[in-house]
Image: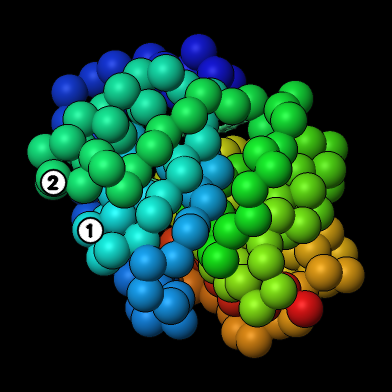
Amino acid sequence: MQAQWNERFAAPGHKYGTEPNAFLRQQAALLAQASQVLVPGDGEGRNGVWLATQGHQVLALDYAEAGLAKARALADQQGVSHRYSAQWADLADWTPPRQRFDALVLVYCHLPSAVRRVAHPQLASLLSPGGWCIVEGFHPRQLQGYTSGGPRDIDMLLTLADLRAEMGDLLDETLAFEGEVALSEGSGHQGPGHVTRWVARRR
Ligand SMILES: C[S@@+](CC[C@H](N)C(=O)[O-])C[C@H]1O[C@@H](n2cnc3c(N)ncnc32)[C@H](O)[C@@H]1O
């Protein structure tokens, strides 16, 4: 998978565009000024870099070097390199930082369920009390006739039940949605998609 992501991100342009995810843009109003935000699986940086342009201090993680390089270039281009740090990490085998965060943003960070069940509680535990978790990902129903992107492997798709089981011990849910939305994010996500959206807050 890592090689595939590097290959995709080596192509010219930004697979999911350079604008942030629409749900993140909406929900980011929850964040206090100058929040410390962790963005695992930030890919080519559209979400993390946008958060940095909003005044937040962002740590982005990804295991695709080609994505990290483009994300750093985007941050540079937008004049926010001082607020955007992109680090290599494989969420299947990583040492969480000692730092605590005010927000955790997981946008289309699809992982095999065995990896996700370990990574999600680990990531949630890095939030400070009151810290926000904002998630959007494809739901298993995306496999039923939708062509707007996402892994074609049900094991990597995401339900509210998964999120509640994996992070509900640490976080209180404030918004939960499973359903169809219109996606327009680069060439990677176009058209109707069946997604899971979740917002929760660290106790
Ligand atoms: C669908 S892309 C989404 C990128 C970005 N979040 C966005 O919405 O534009 C999934 C990203 O997760 C990253 N990823 C997948 N598995 C990973 C892992 N085990 N560790 C770190 N990053 C991973 C990929 O490299 C890729 O950048």
Q: Amino acid at mark 2?
A: Gln
Say whether residue 202 is visible. yes
Is label 2 within 8 A of ligand 1 (CB to nearest ligand atom)? no
Q: Quadrant of the C terminus?
A: bottom right
- Disc 2 + disc 1, Cβ < 8 Å: yes
* Secondary structure of the residue carrying numbered label 1: helix
Looking at the image, residue 64 sits to the left or right of residue 90; the answer is: left
* Secondary structure of the residue carrying numbered label 2: loop
Q: Residue at x 30, y 34 (%)?
A: 71
Q: Amino acid at mark 1?
A: Thr
Q: Quadrant of the N terminus?
A: top right
Q: Looking at the picture, does residue 186 appear above or below residue 129?
A: above
Residue 49 at x, y = what percent? 29, 49
The residue lying toward the viewer, choosing from 75 and 138, is: 75
Residue 83 at x, y = what percent? 31, 48
Looking at the image, residue 129 sits to the left or right of residue 142; the answer is: right
Label 1 packing within 10 angstroms: few (<14), some (14-19), many (20+): some
Rendering quarter of residue 144: bottom right
Sequence-first tag of 2 and 1: 1
Q: Looking at the picture, does residue 31 appear above or below residue 63?
A: below
Q: Which labelled disc corresponds to residue 44?
A: none
Is label 1 within 8 A of ligand 1 (CB to nearest ligand atom)? no
Gap between marks 2 and 1 measured at Cα: 7 Å
Q: Residue at x 21, y 47 (%)?
A: 80
Q: Which labelled disc corresponds to residue 78?
A: 2
What is the tally of numbered marks visible in this picture?
2
Q: Residue at x 63, y 48 (%)?
A: 99
Say whether residue 161 is visible. no
Residue 163 at x, y = what percent? 75, 64
Q: Looking at the picture, does residue 38 appear above or below residue 164?
A: above
Residue on which disc 1 sits: 53
Rendering quarter of residue 128: bottom right
